[in-house]
Structure formats: structure tokens, C-alpha cells
Amino acid sequence: MKNKTINKSRASSYFMMVLIVIGIFPLVYFLTVELGIAQAASDFTKDSTAFINPAEREIDNIAFGVGEKLSFDVNYGFINAGTATMEVTNLIEYKERPCYQIVSRALSNSFFSTFYKVEDRVESIIDAVGIYSWRFEKNLSEGSYRADRMYEFDPFKQLVYYQKDTIETPSAMQDALSTLYYIRTQNLIVGQSVLLDNFTDGKLYPLEVKVLKKETITVEAGTFDCLVLEPITKSVGVFKHEGRLKVWVTNDRLKMPVLMKSKILVGSISAELTDYQLGEIDVF
């Protein structure tokens, strides 16, 4: 009888650990992998979209501004693992340029935090006129795991400083977080694509974002007419197979992300908009 009780207790503990793993995994997945546009990529090719003078690049941004805050529930199937937020916190001067400070956070909920606490923070400094990256930092705290990474871009010298390396880049690069904000400023047309250049954890590669179709969806934050986007890298990475990730953004000037879904080996994960606060659009 005692052995049966012990075996049952072990089985319950094992099941709980499985739930924790599959529950916490999607919490950080979009920030560190999907929104990061893949950490594994081949060497950057010359198929670049950003070899321009950054001082001459002006993007008409009517999509986001200071004060915008988007809140998401992150789920594995029907299991809620926690929440994530994306916020345009400030308009600052950086390298003598007006820049947006954008911060995203991922937090495990109270239940999962008891076993495996997650507190992740990602920050991007984005040029407010040209919508390209100047600085990127992420601080990951997941259970006993810790990771801190930071890199700075010099668009005018076409360089990025990553760890001890200095890497040549196109002039107007996007980081893991700024990618989504740049896409939001673009004219998205069904059947067409937006091309951009991305740098993530030491890798450079071109990215194609396909505009697949229009679709009306309902999430906790409301019902929205959306465009369905599919990011695909031209290199080796998590997006090399179509259908890996889809992002629903509102079909209006805001192009606000409402839903993100990704198929994984078993099931799927999603980030669903639960609340939003619009920001103030700045004119430069």
C-alpha cells in the first residue's frame, strides 16, 4: 500500500513537471524565439533591403506612439502559462536622435511561479524617424536559468557591436523587438510581402513577411478585422517551413497585433490580446 502511495506521488509530481514545462515554454517562446525571428540562421546574404543612408530614411508612422501598451495571455492549448506585455514607454534622445524606448515583459502566473518562475524583460531603442534599431537588450530569468544579452547598432557606420565582435551590417537593421513595430508602419496588402533585415544573437539575415489574407477574429480584448501575416526567413531557421508562425494584426492604421499562433511538435502555442492602451502619435 505504501509503495502504491509513493508511486502515485511520483506520478503526480512527474505530471506536474510536464505541465510546468509545456506551460512555461510558450510564455517566453514569442519573445525569445518567434518575435526574435529565430536564433539559428545562416550567414547573411547580399539580398538586403536596407542599404540606404539612415539619415535620409523617413518612415511615416501613424501606427504607434508613446503610451501604447499591449497585454497578452500566453497559452499552450487551453493551459494558461502567464502574461506578456509590449509597451512604448518613452521618447528619448539617443545618439543625438529621437528614439522610442520599447519594453516587453513576460511573467509566469502565480501557479507556475511556485514551481518555475519566469521574469523576462526585452528592450529595444528604435529610431523614431527611420524606425530602425539602435540598441537591443534582453534579460532572461527562467527558474534557475539566467541570460543577459545586449548589442548596439551603428547605422551610420553599418556596424553592430555584439559581445566581443564587431559585425558589418546594412545601415537600417531591425532587432528582435523592433521588427514587429517596423512592420506596423508598412502598407500591408494581401498577396504581397514586406522585406527587411534582422539581427538576432549574432546572426544577420533577410526576412520576408507575407500578407496572407483578411480575417475577422474575436479575442478577450474584442472583435477585430485583421490581416494575417506569416514571417519567413530566407535562411535556415524556425521560419524555413511555411505555416510555423502566424500573426493577426488589425486591418487599420494601427496594425496592432491581436493574436500570434505557432504550431510546435505537439499542439500549438498562442499569445492573445487581452487589453490595450493606445499611444500618442508623434510628428517629426
Image (cartoon, rainbow, N blue to C red):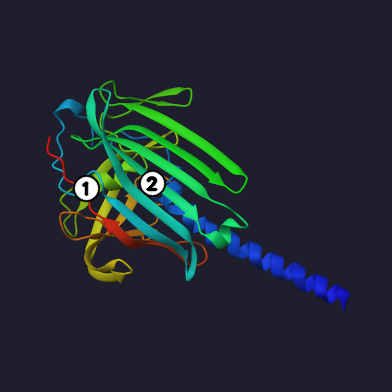
Q: Position of residue 143 (x, y in %)?
A: 60, 49
Residue, x 21% and y 47% (percent of image)? 64
The amino acid marked with disc number 1 is Phe
Q: Position of residue 214 (x, y in %)?
A: 21, 66
> Is residue 207 in sight in this rendering?
no
Cα separation, mark 2 vs mark 1, equals 15 Å
Vertical position of residue 269 compared to residue 231: above or below: below
Q: Quadrant of residue 216?
A: bottom left
272 or 274, which lies in front? 274
Q: Residues within 10 Å of mark 2 (few under 14, many from 20)?
A: many
Number of labelled discs?
A: 2
The amino acid marked with disc number 2 is Ser
Question: Considering only order in the chain, which callout, 1 or 2, is on the residue closer to the N terminus?
Answer: 1
Quadrant of the drawing holding the N terminus? bottom right
Residue, x 46% and y 64% (percent of image)? 75
Q: Position of residue 236 (x, y in %)?
A: 42, 45
Q: Quadrant of residue 218?
A: bottom left
Q: Quadrant of residue 160?
A: top left
Say the numbered circle drawn on residue 104.
2
Q: Residue furthest bottom?
A: 1
- For label 1, the SS is loop
Quadrant of the drawing holding the C terminus? top left
Residue, x 22% and y 27% (percent of image)? 97
Mark 1 — residue?
64
46 or 133, which lies in front? 133
Apparent side of residue 253 relative to residue 217 in the rendered image (left or right): left
